Amino acid sequence: MKFDVIRDTQEKKNFWMFGEYSEIEHVIDQHLKTGDYTIVGLEDMLCIERKHTIAELAKNLSEARFERELIRMSAFKYAYIILEFGLDDAYNYPYVDIVPYKVRSKAKLRGPFIFKKLGEMCVKYNINLIPCNSPKYAEAMVVSIMKRVYEQEF
């Protein structure tokens, strides 16, 4: 079983290469209206949105554009937000290593609000949220999800 992955052209930094996974034949860079990754042939069913850092997620939570993306994601049979960090970073935000000390007191969002929004994503939009603690584990999880979705649908 081999399949091709589509990676959104807007994924420019620290994106997944999938180099060590034999089941992925090709990675195709193509514009995706919603999400960052999918499988060729399942573009209307599978949507994977990647969040590299808690700072990226916190920024997105205050953007109307991200809310519109969540609404679009809710139409997918398989919708995932993959966090390359752990829930401890989300809960302790902005008091985490990635946020400079001088900026922490000025941050508008706090961990409990982020948890509220994460729960809302799961319940209101029916999106699966998977914290993975590292980019390596996140990539491995995404490959596992893609394999299962591919097996399920083909």
Image: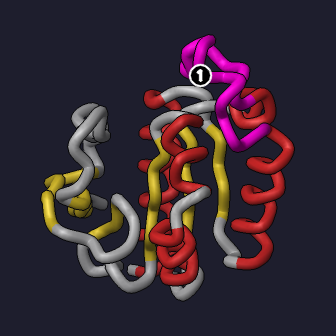
Q: Which stretch did the figure color magenta?
A: 93-110
Q: Is residue 4 visible?
A: yes
Q: Residues within 10 Å of mark 1 (few under 14, many from 20)?
A: few
Picture coordinates of residue 40, whole percent (x, y) = 24, 73
Residue 113 located left or right of residue 4: right
Q: Quadrant of the C terminus?
A: bottom left
User: Is residue 32 located in the magenta-colored stretch of the structure?
Assistant: no
Quarter assignment of residue 102: top right
Q: Amino acid at mark 1?
A: Val
Residue 91 located left or right of residue 9: right
Q: Nearer the viewer, residue 1 or 55?
A: 55
Residue sitting at x 69%, y 42%: 108
Residue sitting at x 44%, y 59%: 147
**SS majority, magenta:** loop
Residue sitting at x 66%, y 34%: 107
Residue sitting at x 30%, y 33%: 14
Q: Nearer the viewer, residue 45 or 14?
A: 14
Give the colour scheme of this rendering: secondary structure
Picture coordinates of residue 44, whole percent (x, y) = 38, 85
User: Is residue 97 located in the magenta-colored stretch of the structure?
Assistant: yes
Picture coordinates of residue 10, whole percent (x, y) = 23, 55
The residue that mark 1 highlights is 103
Residue 108 located left or right of residue 58: right
